[in-house]
Amino acid sequence: MFWADKIADEVERRYKDRIDAGEPIIVRDEKTASGKVHVGSLRSAALHAIVADILNDRGIAVKFLFEINDFDPMDGIPGYLDEATYAPYMGHPLFKVPSPEEGYENFAELYGQEYVEVVNTIGFGAEVYRASELYRSGAMNAAIRAVLDKKEIVHKIYKEVSGSERKADWYPLNVICEKCGNLSATRITGWDGEMVDYECSSDTIEWAEGCGHTGRISPFDGNASLPWKPEWAAKFMANNVHFEGGGKDHYTKGGSRQVAEAISREVLEHEPPYGVFNEFFLVGGKKMSSSKGNAATAKDMTELLPPHILRLLLLKTPINRQIDFDPEGDAVPVLFDTYDRLAEKTWSGVEDDDSQVFKFSHVPEKRAEIQQRFLPRFSQIAFLVQMPHMDLYEEVTGMKGAELTDADKEEIDLRATYAKKWLAEYADEKFIFALQESLPEAANNLSSEQKQAVALFAQKLEAIDMKDGQAIHELTHEIKEESGLSPKEFFTAIYLLFLGKESGPKVGWFLSTLDDSFVQQRLKLEG
Ligand SMILES: [Zn+2]
């Protein structure tokens, strides 16, 4: 079964009464807008979006919420920003930090909106709200009151679940200092049921500077925010969430999920939502960290792959298994091949996990209009776009063996566009080809056996239809047999003569795309 269907089944089982009553299932995801969003976040986006999508597809009412967390403090400065400019804001809530670019209200808006655009592009969009709005609306007040009143239970949970000791006078809440605006540098010293006393000091936390102010303020309506674990529990309750997962790192034994669930039950007396963890998304074997500005961002990924192919990448692997995607290697062509395989299977009438993945790989609004069309291999398109003398439509007509439809042409254009981007920005040298206009110097290095085989090949090709790639392919086998060369020795000779490098696309197909007399001339080493 498609992994997301299993999760949706479990959501249906747990919330049957609610679903029967026609009340919506609330799915929630969030992202702290602390910088450019890395590709790894797309896994969390995929998990929540696909569960909401499937429930919706089953006719169940769903409300999918996405929070731009703009109330977290700035706790690190991304490498692409000026350290000196942002150092004074360490510990300040992100919605109070100025935007690095003009046109955005604050720091969190710039990065939050960039990410929302990304998820909208790939059809993972949700109803967006901001943490600052949630706090200011008063929706977090009940949870804030509960953790202040029952701070001893919070301490007990921290100790029993995660093994961390908190001082008896620690209140799980941070006030925004009225004087300097710092959130992380403040410490609450008293709570009388209406107001909190606090002090703002550089001793509170190592990386944030306090101003020495002491004050007394209401902790409600956006004046203060909860630390991450109690906050997660509070958001479960404030939004009445039914499905929310999280990254694998939060799901360890004694980790933030277990702490949040215990606080939800024991302090807030609220049953936490159902959730599962999502595994990491590695790019070329590296785990991407949002604190370093040197990795593939979620936005980069939407530029490298069209929406349905990126969705396929995110949906084809079970959510609890790692994705390792190396855009420099053959991962992009292989991903397109996977799409083609699922498409052929689905179009032949098979209904199984693959056809389900295929269906949900398309953004919801486009699903109804998916047309059966000819799918030229991405690797071949990537080769053809590098051969300026070739007409793409003509070559693909040859592959298809029939006239192209409008849908075919659209597909060719799409693949050509993305192939060019891939070649220009990511693809390893081995995928880059240039047809050698004159005989490459490397031809001099061919062995006499190679030269003989090439001459024999040229001679026998004269009797073959040069548009027939399969016939040329079969002839290469015959030549290898007769010459006694290994496949590598023979093919290397051909690639060197035409491309000036030792590897290339399938020889039969490749030669069939070239002009007959040019092929003859080159195989006879005549320039
Ligand atoms: Zn202060």
Image (cartoon, rainbow, N blue to C red):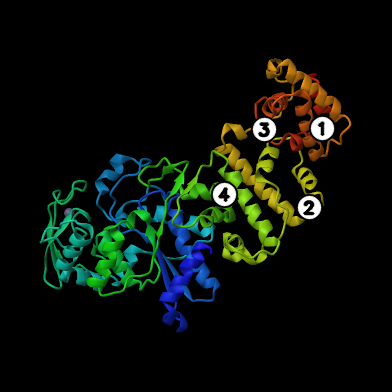
Of badges 4 and 3, nearer the viewer stands 3
The reply to whether callout 3 and callout 1 are in contact (CB within 8 Å) is no
Between discs 4 and 1, the one toward the N terminus: 4
Q: Secondary structure at mark 4?
A: loop
Circle 1: residue type:
Asp
Between discs 3 and 2, the one toward the N terminus: 2
Distance from Cα at disc 4 to Cα at disc 3: 23 Å
Q: Residue at x 62, y 63 (%)?
A: 366
Q: Secondary structure at mark 1?
A: loop
Q: Quadrant of ligand 1?
A: bottom left
Q: Which residue is mark 4?
A: 305
Q: Which residue is mark 1?
A: 515
Between discs 2 and 1, the one toward the N terminus: 2
Q: Residues within 10 Å of mark 2 (few under 14, many from 20)?
A: some
Distance from Cα at disc 4 to Cα at disc 1: 33 Å
Q: Quadrant of the C terminus?
A: top right
Q: Which residue is mark 3?
A: 504
Question: Which numbered disc covers residue 404?
Answer: 2
Of badges 3 and 2, nearer the viewer stands 3
